Image (cartoon, rainbow, N blue to C red):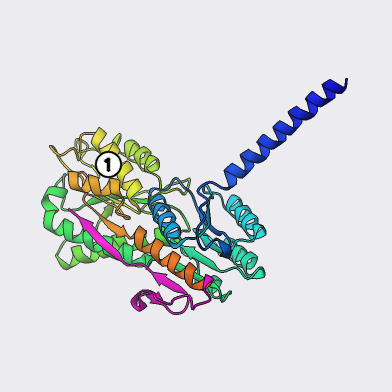
Amino acid sequence: MKKFISVILSLLTVICFSGCRDNVSENNNDNQSGQNAKVGEIAVFYYTFSDTYISSVRAEMDKELKNAGFKFQNYDGNGNQTTQTEQVQTAVAKGCSLLAVNIVDTGSDDAAQNIVNLAKEKNIPVVFFNRSVNESVIKSYDKCVMVGTDYEMAGHMQGQMIGDYLVKHYNSVDLNRDGKISYVLFKGQEGNLEAIARTQFAVEDANKVLSENGKPALEFYDEVNQNKYLVDQDGTWSSAAATDYMGTILAQYSESAGNMIELVIANNDEMALGAIASLQAAGYNNGLGKKIPVFGVDATQAAKAKIEEGAMTGTIKQDAEGMADAIVDVAENYLENKTAFEGIDEKNVVGNWRINIPYEQYVR
């Protein structure tokens, strides 16, 4: 009996130890240590690891934090705000030195404000990045800033680029020769400030250019759809959503029916690439036959490759490296008891609460 009990206790010890090891491994992936480890771990929260642009930011952030010698921990919110908030609570309880947060829920201020309150209680600085947080939330804590973009500018630049392209290539784009351009627009997420601005200004600014050149305004392909966009229902700005939408559209709208979509506008490159996949399956944008112009935002490597191939027309570059640099610079300033914006290019600083990383057009 003693031997039996001893065996059982040994097995229980192994099981408990394995469980603990698994938990530590899950919670400490990508953890790095360096010369600044004494300041405590920097906790970096991403709304999801699966987003292509965010993956590029994460790669740059990892590199910058390692080069700066910081110990850090990456957390994958996996598109779930409850998960991310719980991760923040865990990091705060562990005594992290700074929170860098790519917020999941951009539809209201509640989630961001909750994170600020958790950090403020422990005097932990917070750097929100990429997905915009309202000024009132940032200013509720004197150790909180936002590193993002002038998200309206992306829509304006995309609209200008679309308008300029259409004026130059109007006859070849107007496949059914009705004197108008029929378009589809893929919106990444309802309630997201970036998605709202891109959706609005991409069309408005393109129409302004068309009007100035004596051309009629763009027409959304489906007159029944009052929103004049198609949204990714999962809020993940995914290529899969755009591929599915485009495949369904092309089954009904075609050149033979005289109602072919003649322009694709996407709020990010992943959805632009998803639309291209369906277009190519239908015989378009393959480099030989007809091309439907497709525009995105982000300038991911995959999108730039499609532009070079001629399958995609243009995109707006979000500077992942520039964003990572700014986040780490602000983090260093906070942790070295300097002012948040010390060393930051003044032309990119908005008031005393935000840094905007500039956009650029990317075309062939």
Give coordinates of residue 165: x percent, y percent: 17, 57
Q: Is residue 298 visible?
A: yes
- Nearer-the-camera pick, 85 or 67: 67
- Nearer-the-camera pick, 14 or 73: 14
Identity, as a three-letter code, of the amino acid under mark 1: Ile
Residue shown at 41% from the left, 67% from the top: 326
Q: Quadrant of the N terminus?
A: top right
Q: Is residue 222 visible?
A: no
**Is 58 situated above or below 261?**
below
Left or right: where does residue 3 sit relative to residue 317?
A: right
Name the outermost residue toward the right.
Answer: 1
| Tag 1 residue | 276
Give coordinates of residue 220: x percent, y percent: 30, 52
Left or right: where does residue 207 sit relative to residue 50?
A: left
Residue 346 falls inside the magenta stretch: yes
Residue shown at 74% from the left, 27% from the top: 11
**Is 289 situated above or below 64?**
above
Which region is colored magenta? 335-364
**Is 347 situated above or below 182?**
below
Residue 168 falls inside the magenta stretch: no
Give coordinates of residue 358: x percent, y percent: 32, 67
Neighbourhood count class around disc 1 (C-alpha, 10 Å): few under 14, some 14–19, many 20 upward? many
Give coordinates of residue 173: x percent, y percent: 16, 49
Left or right: where does residue 212 sit relative to residue 122?
A: left
Residue shown at 39% from the left, 55% from the top: 60
Determine the image quadrant of residue 123. bottom right
Residue at disc 1, secondary structure: helix
- Nearer-the-camera pick, 283 or 256: 283
